[in-house]
Amino acid sequence: MRVDVSLCDLCDGCNAICPTSAIRVRADSWSLIEDACISCGFCVTFCPVEALAMGVKKAGFAG
């Protein structure tokens, strides 16, 4: 899982849809609990600003 922090608007939608609660969204940050992530891709599909991606690290993406 990767997040492009320049695109993420911290809407918390990814956290709401995550079946394992692997995502933490705070007022000014986003984090992933890697051990809890099952790579289902729900958050990637749900993200309205396309800030999330699965797989290989891309330029601009953290994680």
Image (cartoon, helix red, strand yellow):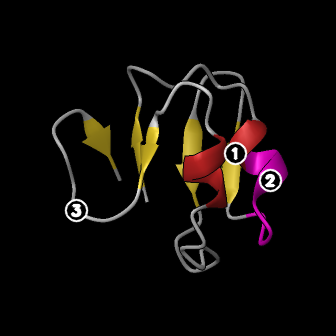
Which mark is on residue 56? 3
As for residue 44 lying within the magenta part, the answer is no
Left or right of 49, for residue 63? left
Mark 2 residue type: Ile
Counting labels gives: 3
Characterize the local packing of mark 3: few (<14), some (14-19) or many (20 or more) Cα atoms within 10 angstroms.
few
Q: Do the residues labelled 2 and 3 touch (CB within 8 Å)?
A: no
Left or right of 33, for residue 59? left
Vertical comparison of 58 with 26: above or below: below
Vertical comparison of 31 with 50: above or below: below
The residue drawn where x is 55% and y is 50% is 44
Which mark is on residue 17? 2
Vertical comparison of 54 with 48: above or below: below
Q: In which quarter of the image is the N terminus?
A: bottom left
**Residue 39: x, y in percent?**
54, 74
**Residue 18: x, y in percent?**
75, 60
Q: Is mark 2 on a helix, strand or loop?
A: helix
Mark 3 residue type: Val
Characterize the local packing of mark 1: few (<14), some (14-19) or many (20 or more) Cα atoms within 10 angstroms.
many
Q: What element carries label 3?
A: loop
Alpha-carbon span between mark 3 and mark 1: 19 Å
Q: Do the residues labelled 2 and 1 touch (CB within 8 Å)?
A: yes
Alpha-carbon span between mark 2 and mark 1: 5 Å
Magenta range is 15-21
Residue where numbered disc 1 is placed: 14
Q: Which numbered disc flags the more N-terminal residue, 3 or 1?
A: 1
Characterize the local packing of mark 2: few (<14), some (14-19) or many (20 or more) Cα atoms within 10 angstroms.
some
Q: What element carries label 1?
A: helix
Left or right of 50, for residue 54? left
Mark 1 residue type: Cys
**Residue 29: x, y in percent?**
58, 31
**Residue 26: x, y in percent?**
71, 32
